[in-house]
Image: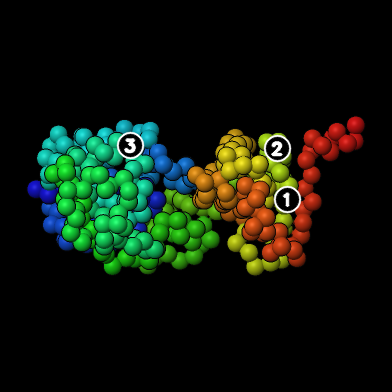
């Protein structure tokens, strides 16, 4: 029996997931697919959203009418902590031979697959099926393959690679549903209709449990929240901390804070500290995080407030302040320096 492994956060599970796995199962001849929600992705930071058990419940609802081929496997949720695919594979190998086991990943994850724990072992213990993703091209020549894979190749033939381990890598072009979980979460928070992207049972569960609700109910006064975030950045030596009221403009948020770090590491450190401080005071996490690994431009999305943290040189390059020159400058000041100046 050819058995597939289809993991992810499923936050939330949407029709893109269902379309992808049905197409893969048909094209690759999979008789069974383990659909496995992760407890926590070690390569991603925690975001505001449903609990692991709620994501598991939504995934079960999404696949409940898909037939016996698709089995929602809760082993990673039960294990808790960081979810490592190698642990799941070793567990499944107790029942399925490696030659019959197929790990399904997107082209985006394939590019960074060498960041996965024990990825070399994964290439020995299972076959890979790499699917197309919106915005990502599948490799068609050996020179286009990621560097980490080249030492493992025995033979390359357009959309199929035979590995030295005896396992294989197969590339499958899918008819992609042009939507992502990030977009759906954003649309749900602004109460935009998403029924064309979600199974009905999943949409009902989200509404019944008030998932992906706007953060405003918990944050309250975004003017005060903006000042709070700015003070946290001042406290960690953020450079040129500025705040803007954007409500008179057409902008993605009502407020914005910009600050710089002396290095990319400092910019990422400012973001990490801010998330920790906000979590302690308001008990909320960002809706989305971008750029944390590189630290050149880190973006923390708190709904009506977006925080932009730059390596200072990069900030000069993008010059966001000039885009908001007609916005209200909140004239934020470091409270420590203010107090020192008055004493």
The structure residue drawn at horizontal position 28% and vertical position 67%, both measured from the top left corner, is 175
Q: Position of residue 112 (x, y in %)?
A: 36, 48
Q: Position of residue 207 (x, y in %)?
A: 44, 55
Mark 2 vs mark 1, foreground winner is 2
Q: Is residue 18 or residue 176 the one in the foreground?
A: 176
Q: Is residue 244 or residue 264 the one in the foreground?
A: 264
Q: Furthest residue to the right?
A: 343
Alpha-carbon span between mark 1 and mark 3: 40 Å
Q: Is residue 284 or residue 249 the one in the foreground?
A: 249
Q: Is residue 171 or residue 273 the one in the foreground?
A: 171
Which residue position is annotated with label 1? 242
Disc marking residue 237: 2
Q: Tell which circle, 2 or 1, labels the residue nearer the N-terminal end.
A: 2
- Secondary element type, mark 3: loop
Which residue position is annotated with label 3? 117
The structure residue drawn at horizontal position 40% and vertical position 38%, both measured from the top left corner, is 42
Q: Position of residue 289 (x, y in %)?
A: 52, 49
Question: Does residue 75 appear in this view?
Answer: no
Q: Residues within 10 Å of mark 3 (few under 14, many from 20)?
A: some
């Amino acid at each position: 029996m050819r058995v597939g492994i289809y993991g992810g956060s499923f936050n939330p599970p949407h029709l893109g997931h269902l379309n992808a796995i049905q197409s893969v199962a048909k094209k690759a001849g999979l008789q069974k697919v383990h659909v496995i929600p992760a407890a926590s992705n070690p390569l991603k930071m925690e975001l505001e959203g449903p609990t692991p058990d709620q994501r598991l419940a939504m995934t079960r609802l999404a696949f409940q009418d898909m037939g016996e081929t698709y089995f929602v496997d809760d082993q990673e949720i039960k294990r808790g902590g960081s979810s490592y695919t190698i642990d799941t594979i070793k567990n499944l190998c107790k029942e399925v031979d490696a030659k019959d086991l197929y790990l399904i990943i997107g082209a985006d994850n394939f590019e960074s697959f060498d960041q996965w724990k024990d990825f070399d072992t994964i290439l020995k213990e299972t076959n890979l099926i790499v699917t197309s993703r919106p915005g990502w091209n599948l490799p068609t020549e050996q020179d286009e393959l990621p560097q980490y894979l080249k030492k493992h190749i025995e033979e390359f033939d357009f959309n199929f690679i035979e590995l030295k381990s005896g396992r294989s890598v197969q590339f499958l072009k899918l008819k992609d549903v042009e939507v992502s979980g990030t977009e759906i979460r954003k649309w749900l928070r602004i109460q935009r209709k998403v029924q064309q992207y979600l199974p009905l049972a999943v949409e009902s569960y989200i509404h019944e449990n008030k998932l992906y609700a706007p953060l405003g109910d918990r944050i309250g006064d975004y003017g005060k929240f903006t000042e709070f975030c700015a003070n946290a950045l001042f406290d960690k030596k953020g450079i040129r901390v500025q705040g803007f009221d954007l409500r008179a403009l057409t902008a993605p948020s009502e407020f914005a804070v910009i600050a710089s770090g002396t290095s990319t590491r400092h910019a990422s450190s400012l973001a990490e500290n801010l998330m920790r401080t906000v979590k302690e005071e308001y008990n909320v996490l960002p809706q989305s995080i971008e750029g944390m690994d590189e630290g050149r431009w880190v973006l923390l999305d708190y709904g009506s407030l977006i925080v932009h943290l730059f390596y200072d040189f990069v900030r000069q390059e993008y010059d966001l302040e000039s885009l908001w020159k007609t916005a209200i400058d909140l004239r934020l000041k470091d409270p420590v320096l203010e107090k020192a100046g008055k004493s």
